[in-house]
Image (cartoon, rainbow, N blue to C red):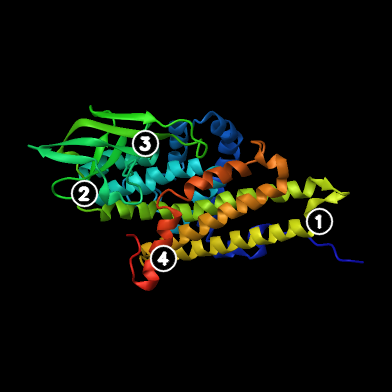
Amino acid sequence: MAKEVIPRELNALMALDTRLSKEQLAIREVVRNIGDKELRPNIASWYEAGNLPAREIARKLGSLGLLGMHLEGYGCAGTDALSYGLACLELEAVDSGLRSLVSVQGSLAMFAIHEYGSEEQKEMWLPKMASGEAIGCFGLTEADFGSNPSGMRTFAKRDGSDWVINGSKMWITNGTVADVAIIWAQSDEGIRGFCVPTKTPGLKATLIKHKLSLRASLTAELVFDGMRIPDAYRLPGATSLRAPLMCLAEARFGIIFGAVGAARDSFESAIKYSKTRIQFDKPIAGYQLTQAKIAEMATGITTSLLLAYHLADLKDSGKIEPEQISMGKYHNVQTALEIARSARSILGGAGITSEYPIFRHMANLETVLTYEGTHEIHMLVIGQAITGETAFR
């Protein structure tokens, strides 16, 4: 008589949790619980409506210490990189839009202030942003300058002790609900960054509608029309394009983990469905082609997670390099998208409905593939690191 085979949860298959400390496991459990109890029950309706109660969610996540959690001081939790990555993973397992909210808040807006701001700017904004009382956005991308931010047209001109900024930014997450905007602009002195309250006259944020991806995320166009600000709003430590690029590297690190969350949720949905969907008198989980897809998905998730863990180790040791982050995003987002597509195929027609999360993850990942550096740009970054030759132009 054949021995009964007991199904194993994915993390148990390769003993992945043995890699984590008690504190890291506890943080993961906290984020997973709030995702399951408060976010997941509402995410499909938020996605269909193209809306998100961002302020309510920010305050809730802030109360748990998840906003800017990898930063030190000013009300921030000061966790290690792996703990931050695990939080991103669990949030994106619900929806990429939720991880985007946290990434923009902590790894772009808060990191810019923490790394390049004055002491007054840090004390004014970081505690409120860590608690979720204040929301930030990050204005770098322009309609005509995404992969080439050095060509941005937004311009800041000195006028006495003030600056006058004209221009626009596109695809700005949290833009319509932000209390403070980190704005990057050309100037006669080079690229500069500014920490600007969004109620400043001359700044207008308009919600971008009709998106077919990342619908549970508030995306805006920012327009600056003669916006006059004092020099005290300038980020004194940001003196070149390197500053916003370092912020982007922080956000990409969260994506490396987040993409695994979207892949895992798609995988788990496909597993559950395959065990209950009966065709030709048995569950489709018992057929070889379905198991081949399951094996490929499980392997992809596991290798992506191991890569993410390794990058977290490098980050915590202060040894991580931009091209390593590029490889992580390049591999993990592409793998997650392939997994979502494979998982959807197991569900057949049911996979395109909002009853299941897979098609939503699949659509979101199409955007994740091209934001924070397109898939192609990261490919070229890796190629340059290996060959020493630049192929961007």
Which residue is located at x 66 percent, y 47 percent?
A: 344
Disc with the residue nearer the chain's start (4 vs 3): 3
Name the element at disc 3: loop
Which residue is located at x 75 percent, y 58 percent?
A: 289
Instruction: Note whether 210 is above or below 392 in the view shown.
Output: above
Circle 2 packing at 10 Å, graded few (<14), some (14-19), many (20+), is many
Circle 1 packing at 10 Å, graded few (<14), some (14-19), many (20+), is few
Question: Depth check: 285 or 55 in front?
Answer: 285
Disc with the residue nearer the chain's start (1 vs 3): 3
Of badges 1 and 3, the one in the foreground is 1
What residue is shown with label 2? Answer: 191
What residue is shown with label 4? Answer: 382
What residue is shown with label 1? Answer: 286
Residue, far front: 393
Which residue is located at x 64 percent, y 36 percent?
A: 354
Residue type at mark 3 is Ile
Using the rendered image of the protein, determine whether residue 22 is visible from the camera's viewpoint.
yes
What residue is shown with label 3? Answer: 135
Residue 108 appears left or right of 238: right
Residue at mark 1 to residue at mark 4: CA–CA distance: 40 Å
